[in-house]
Amino acid sequence: MRLEEYWGVGPKTRDLLAEQLGVEAALEAIESADVRRLTDAGLARGRATRILRHAHGGAAMDVLATRDSRNVYKELLDLVSSYAVTDDAADRIRILTPLSTEAAMAERLDDVMEARESWDRLAADERDTVLAAFDTYDERGGGERAGVQAALELAEAGFAEGVFEPLSALDQSTLRDGLAALAGLEGDDRVGSGADDRLDELRDQLGAVEDMAATPGTVVEEIQSAARGTDQLRESLARHVTSETGIDVAAVREAMPSEATDARGFVGETLRTLADDRRTAVEEREQQVAATLETDLDAAREEIDAAVDATSDIAVSISLARFALAFDLSRPQFVDSEVTGVVDARNLFLEDAGVSVQPVTYAVGDHNLDVASANAPPTGDRVAVLTGANSGGKTTLLETLCQVQLLAQMGLPVPAREAQLNPVDRIVFHRRHASFNAGVLESTLRTVVPPLSEAGRTLMLVDEFEAITEPGSAADLLHGLVTLTVEKDALGVFVTHLADDLEPLPETARTDGIFAEGLTTDLELQVDYQPRFGTVGRSTPEFIVSRLVANADDPAERVDYQTLAEAVGETAVQRTLADAEWSQN
């Protein structure tokens, strides 16, 4: 396979990877999803992850049918990766994609839920030990040697059950030999310091002799004062060199020339010969040690690869477990019927931002959700038109359904007490875009309609379609889109303020509503975010006008707001003001 056959690899990227890694190594990095190797070669992290997502996600990436669906996907990956225990784990999480089969989704969910249980069982000090091992892994720069060290540290600490089970199969003795070999070999067959005492000694001697050879005149000055003849000069030099370098005196004498014209020439030639001798000795010893280390490394290769893989997989699993526990996520249920349904679902992005979230129960399609409330979602309606107050959480509900569907199809637990769904081929999430022109209308229709024309399952999550064209035309177009969704056997939730203009809806479609209930003691709008099924939600503008009347400091503005109060119902406005005042007292 050629590099340019991968999505996102054009001529410039191909040439960069070929130059920095070589074609075969670049192909291997892409096939093994090695983000670090690609970024070290000079690719931007974002580009590397996009290439790998498409290389490993394939057609399953088509589920992200709109820009807003892709944005939710990217935000989810950012959130999940923030719980990663290593940089490598974060990279691997960033390239997770929706999966193409329900079996693959279930398999990943099995792994994540097992990891969650394993992590949840650990005491606080045990978790600290695991996190410290992975912190050290990052401090060591990751890679093979760091992976083996982390695996040994965790295994020696007694972690061998659940998500740590792969560690129990490792031969720790063989791994220690392999780790010593890895520590000794620095690359390109060069042996590092500390791998062999004799080699370290020879290197120290070579360095000391080379330093002396660089300044032979200084050596002559130090030995000449004690020498009164050639023989004494030889002995003085031998003792001095031995003292300064640790080289055996016999080896120093052997390096001395038989004849020399003067003391400086004699010393210089001795030191040069001795340096050549030590250099040869270093090279020969290094080759011997490298051969031994390579033999040890080959013998431990299988265990090393297993340890590195175990460390990497455990780091990813624990990262996902920490994410699942942080948000109390649960396993979704894949069902045969066409449905997307949740009980007590929460929006992850709001929770992560520290916003207090009211759990919401909602469903479209055929479900059997375990809902004790009398306000349970009807079953059988494939499409819902969601209405209600501004700032009532309608768009948030669409985003929450998108999060649940995406996480489930990525094989990850979801932010709901219960979730029933059927994997879809496309998620058409389209947020409200407050642009009012023909170009926006056309581009929106080109975005939301073609997915319905394709074979397979589609989930439509469309927000305030009327914001992009005239109200009359918007109602007609939205009614047509709802009808098309029903006719194509798709599932859909459409947020709108035009519910009354859409009647009558197709048989398998319904209208739901979110209601404002009053004002808080701070005169903030109080909303019940749980939709009421089969009814049109009302924005109750008297609450908004009541707040404007109450907060008006300027007398003239207050009079004008009173005029608006008369328009929406003076009695209702005064009642809401009285309720708020009573609550404050």
Image (cartoon, grey):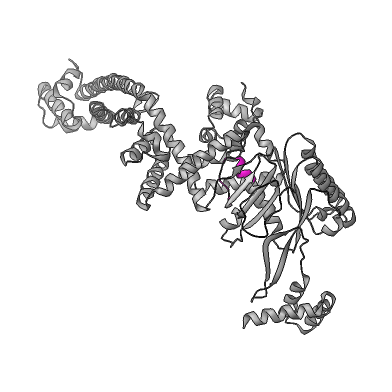
Question: Where is the C terminus found, in terms of image quarters?
Answer: bottom right
Residue 43 visible (yes or no): no
**Is 405 in front, or is 470?**
405
User: So how many labels did they put on this image?
Assistant: 0
Q: Position of residue 221 (x, y in %)?
A: 19, 32
User: 90 left or right of 560?
Assistant: left
Residue 417 visible (yes or no): yes
User: 330 left or right of 539?
Assistant: left
Q: Quadrant of residue 61?
A: top right
Q: Residue reaching furthest right?
A: 472
Q: Is residue 40 above or below residue 433?
A: above
Q: Quadrant of residue 74?
A: top right
**Is 366 in front, or is 190?**
366
Q: Is residue 391 magenta?
A: no
Q: Position of residue 505 (x, y in %)?
A: 84, 52
Highlighted magenta segment, given as a residue range:
405-415
Question: Where is the N terminus found, in terms of image quarters?
Answer: top right
Q: Is residue 293 above or below residue 194?
A: above
**Is 288 in front, or is 2?**
2
Q: Position of residue 529 (x, y in %)?
A: 67, 62
Q: Position of residue 325 (x, y in %)?
A: 49, 51
